[in-house]
Amino acid sequence: GGSIAGDGASPITALPAQRREWATWCPPSKEPEIDVWVVDDDTGVGQWVAAETKGWVVDKSWRDTYLCVEYERDGKHIQEFGPQHVRRREQKETVLQVLERQQARAEAEAERQGKEGKATGGLARGDELKGP
């Protein structure tokens, strides 16, 4: 068997599309499309294992917190995994790493746009000067 920390929430698969976040590319499927990091309870050794998404676990704000997946390793297991333990099938970056990269890129772009606005006297592109 394997284990990963979960919060005990139940999986919800009828989540409105606009509320899904990191799991948008992990639709429920009968084919393994993701890998999950499973740590063996007996040996403490972890490895990436092919998994099928069964549903999403969301917080009170309907944001994805975990994926409920099924994988085979010494039998079938259904378990919840966070973004730091999920990646696209045979990729290197975890979902968490992808999200952090996207957030850093968005923050850098926002900072760049903020500096451009200061350089033009506080006007951003598209702003108009209004007379008295």
Image: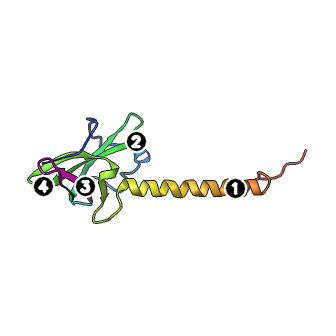
Q: Quadrant of the C terminus?
A: top right
Rounded to the nearest angstrom, the CA distance separating label 4 from label 3 is: 11 Å
Q: 116 or 14, which lies in front?
A: 116
**What is the spatial separation of the Cα atoms under label 1 and label 3, in whole angstroms?**
41 Å
Q: Which labelled disc corresponds to residue 36?
A: 3
Q: Are marks 2 and 1 in contact (CB under 8 Å)?
A: no
Residue indicated by mark 1? 115
Q: CA distance from mark 1 to mark 4?
A: 52 Å
As measured in the structure, the alpha-carbon distance from the residue carrying label 2 to the one carrying label 1 is 32 Å
Residues at badges 2 and 3 in contact (C-beta under 8 Å)? no
Q: Nearer the viewer, mark 1 or mark 3?
A: 1
User: What percent of the width, then of the height, locates residue 58?
Assistant: 35, 40
- Viewer-side label of 2, 1: 1
Depth check: give the residue in front, 45 or 100.
45
Residue 105, percent from left and from top: 53, 58
10 Å crowding of disc 3: few (<14), some (14-19), many (20+): many
The three-letter amino acid code for the residue at tag 2 is: Arg
Q: Which residues are magenta?
A: 34-45
Distance of label 2 from label 3 (alpha carbons)? 20 Å
Q: As shown in the figure, which amino acid type bears the numbered disc 4? A: Arg
- In primary-sequence order, the first of circles 4 and 3 is 3
User: Which residue has dot 4 on it?
Assistant: 73
Task: Identify the residue position indicated by label 2 in the image.
Answer: 63
Name the amino acid type tagged 3.
Val
